[in-house]
C-alpha cells in the first residue's frame, strides 16, 4: 500500500512539474506523449508491486528474434 | 529546440569512448572468455578489425545525410510510415535491452558486491535521478562533463593497469588457438555486440556535432577505437592474471582483478577504483541511451521538445530494471540469444539497408 502511494506521489510530482509549463505553451502533442508514458509507468509500477511475478517484456523480443537466433546458433555464431 | 545545441568533435569523441566501454568494462571479460578461453584477446582483436569497418559504414551513412539523425534518415529513405514504424520498434526494444538492462546489471552488481543490505530499487532510483537530470540538461552539458571527467577516468585506469601488472603471468595466454579458429566466431560476435554494434545510436547525436571537414566521423572512429582498446587491455589483463578458467566463472572478473592488488601488504582493496571507473562510464552510457531514445521518440512523433518525455521514461526505467531479468541465468542467456541477434539486425542490417536504399535512389535519378 505504502509503495503504491509512493508511486502515485512521484507521478503527482512529475505532473506538477511538467504539465503547467506545457499547458502554458500549448504543446498538445507533448502533453499527450507525457500522459501516455506516465500512465504506462504508473501502470507497470503498480503491477510490479501487486503481482509477484511480472513477466519480463524481453520475452516478446526473444520470441520475435527466435528464428534469427536459431539460424545463428545453427551456423555456430552464437551459443 | 532540438537542433540548437552543438558539441565539438573532441567532446563527441570522448562521449563515444565512454559509450563504447561503458557497461562492458566489468562484465564483458567473463562472457567472451567463457566463449573463447585464453584466445579471447585474439577474438577481441578480430572484433576491433571488423568494428572499424562497421564504424566506417556508419560514417558513410552520416556523410550521405548531413545534419540528419538516424530517425530522419529512415524517414527520408523508407517513407514516413514505414520509416517511423521501424524507428519506433527500434526505440522500444532498445529501451528495454539497453538502459533497462544496463541499470539492472548495475543494481545487481551493487547489491551483490558492494552494498548487500541496500535494496536494489533505491540504488536504481538514485542513479536514474542523475541520469534524468543529465538528459534534461542536454547533450552539451553531458559532453562538457565527460570532458571534465575523462582525465580522472584515464588516471584511475592507468593506475589500475600499472598496479595489476605486478601479478601477470604471460604463460596463461598459452596455448594459443588450442581449439582452432571455430570457437572464436561466437566470441567475436559477442564482443562486437557490446562494443561496436550499439554505436549505431550515436548517429542520433552526430547532427549536433560541429562538422567542419568531416571531423565528426573521425571522432566517432577514434572514440570507438579507444574504447575498444581499453576493453582489449582489460581482457588480456584478466586472462594473464587469473587464467581463462576463473575469468569465465567469475561474474565480474575486472572487479576481482582489482581486489587482488596488494602491494607490500599495504596498498590493498582498491577495487573501489575500478568500480568508480565503471560507474562513471556506465552513467554516460545510460544517459546517452536515455537522451538518444527520448530524442528519437520526439522525432518519431513530431514533438518539438524531448524533455517532457524524460521523467516518465525515468519512472519506466526504474520499474523495468527491477524485473527485466528475473535471474542471472536468464540474463546470460538473453545476452547471447537476444541481445546479439538484436544488435546485428539494428547495427548491421539496418545501416546496410539504408545504404542500399540510398544507392537505388541515386540509380533511379540517373
Image: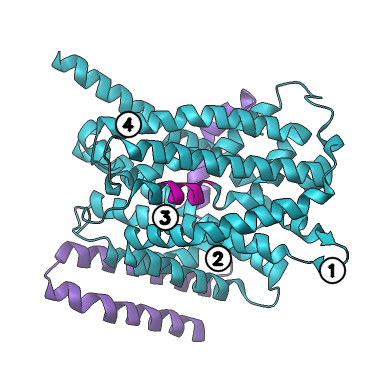
Chain colours: A purple, B cyan
Q: Which residue is mark 2?
A: B322
Give the spatial CA distance, label 2 vs label 1: 39 Å
Disc nearer the start of the sequence (2/4): 4
- Give coordinates of residue B213: x percent, y percent: 28, 35
- Give coordinates of residue B87: x percent, y percent: 32, 43
Disc sitting over residue B19 in the figure: none
Give the spatial CA distance, label 2 vs label 4: 36 Å
Between marks 1 and 3 in the image, the one whose residue lies nearer the viewer: 1
Q: Residue shown at 65%/67% (left/top)?
A: B110
Chain identity of mark 3: B
The local secondary structure at tag 4 comes to helix
Q: Nearer the viewer, residue B100 or B47?
A: B47
Q: Which residue is mark 1?
A: B266
Dot 2, how many residues are within 10 Å of its Cα: few (below 14), some (14-19), or many (20+)? many
Side of B130 relative to B167 (left or right): left
Give the spatial CA distance, label 3 vs label 4: 20 Å
Evaluate whether residue B215 shows in this view: yes
Q: Which residue is mark 3?
A: B288
Instruction: Please give the range of residues in magenta.
Output: B13-20
Mark 4 and mark 1 on one chain: yes
Chain identity of mark 4: B
Disc nearer the start of the sequence (2/1): 1
Give the spatial CA distance, label 4 vs label 1: 53 Å
Q: Residue shown at 58%/28% (left/top)?
A: A72
Mark 3 and mark 2 on one chain: yes
Q: Residue shown at 45%/50% (left/top)?
A: B14
Dot 3, how many residues are within 10 Å of its Cα: few (below 14), some (14-19), or many (20+)? many
Dot 4, how many residues are within 10 Å of its Cα: few (below 14), some (14-19), or many (20+)? many
Amino acid at each position: 500500500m505504502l509503495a503504491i502511494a509512493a508511486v502515485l506521489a512521484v507521478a503527482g510530482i512529475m505532473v506538477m512539474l511538467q504539465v503547467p509549463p506545457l499547458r502554458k505553451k500549448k504543446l498538445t502533442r507533448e502533453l499527450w506523449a507525457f500522459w501516455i508514458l506516465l500512465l504506462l509507468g504508473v501502470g507497470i509500477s503498480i503491477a510490479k508491486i501487486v503481482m509477484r511475478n511480472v513477466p519480463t517484456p524481453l520475452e516478446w523480443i526473444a520470441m520475435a528474434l527466435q528464428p534469427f537466433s536459431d539460424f545463428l546458433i545453427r551456423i555456430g555464431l552464437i551459443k | 529546440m532540438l537542433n540548437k545545441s552543438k558539441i565539438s568533435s573532441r567532446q563527441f569523441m570522448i562521449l563515444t569512448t565512454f559509450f563504447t566501454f561503458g557497461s562492458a568494462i566489468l562484465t564483458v571479460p567473463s562472457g567472451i572468455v567463457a566463449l573463447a578461453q585464453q584466445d579471447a584477446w585474439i577474438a577481441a582483436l578480430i572484433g576491433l578489425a571488423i568494428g572499424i569497418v562497421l564504424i566506417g559504414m556508419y560514417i558513410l551513412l552520416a556523410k550521405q545525410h548531413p545534419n540528419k539523425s538516424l530517425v530522419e534518415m529512415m524517414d527520408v529513405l523508407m517513407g514516413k510510415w514505414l520509416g517511423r514504424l521501424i524507428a519506433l520498434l527500434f526505440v522500444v526494444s532498445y529501451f528495454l535491452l539497453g538502459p533497462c538492462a544496463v541499470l539492472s546489471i548495475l543494481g545487481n552488481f551493487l547489491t551483490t558486491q558492494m552494498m548487500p543490505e541496500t535494496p536494489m530499487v533505491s540504488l536504481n532510483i538514485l542513479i536514474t535521478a542523475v541520469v534524468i537530470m543529465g538528459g534534461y540538461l542536454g547533450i552539451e552539458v553531458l559532453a562538457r562533463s565527460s570532458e571534465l571527467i575523462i582525465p580522472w577516468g584515464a588516471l584511475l585506469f592507468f593506475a589500475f593497469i600499472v598496479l595489476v601488472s605486478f601479478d601477470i603471468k604471460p604463460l596463461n595466454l598459452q596455448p594459443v588457438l588450442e581449439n582452432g579458429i571455430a570457437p572464436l566466431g561466437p566470441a567475436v560476435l559477442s564482443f562486437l555486440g557490446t562494443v561496436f554494434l550499439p554505436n549505431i545510436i550515436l548517429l542520433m547525436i552526430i547532427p549536433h556535432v560541429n562538422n567542419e571537414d568531416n571531423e565528426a566521423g573521425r571522432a566517432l572512429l577514434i572514440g570507438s577505437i579507444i574504447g575498444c582498446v581499453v576493453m582489449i587491455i582489460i581482457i588480456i589483463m584478466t586472462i594473464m592474471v587469473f587464467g581463462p578458467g576463473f575469468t569465465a566463472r567469475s561474474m565480474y572478473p575486472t572487479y576481482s582483478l582489482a581486489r587482488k592488488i596488494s602491494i607490500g601488504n599495504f596498498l590493498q582493496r582498491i577495487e573501489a577504483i575500478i568500480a568508480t571507473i565503471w560507474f562513471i562510464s556506465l552513467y554516460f552510457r545510460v544517459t546517452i541511451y536515455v537522451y538518444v531514445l527520448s530524442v528519437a521518440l520526439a522525432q518519431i512523433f513530431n514533438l518539438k521538445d524531448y524533455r517532457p518525455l524524460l521523467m516518465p521514461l525515468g519512472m519506466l526505467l526504474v520499474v523495468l530494471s527491477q524485473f527485466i531479468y528475473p535471474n542471472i541465468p536468464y540474463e546470460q542467456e538473453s545476452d547471447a540469444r537476444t541481445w546479439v541477434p538484436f544488435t546485428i539486425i539494428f547495427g548491421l542490417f539496418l545501416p546496410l539497408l539504408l545504404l542500399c536504399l540510398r544507392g537505388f535512389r541515386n540509380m533511379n535519378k540517373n
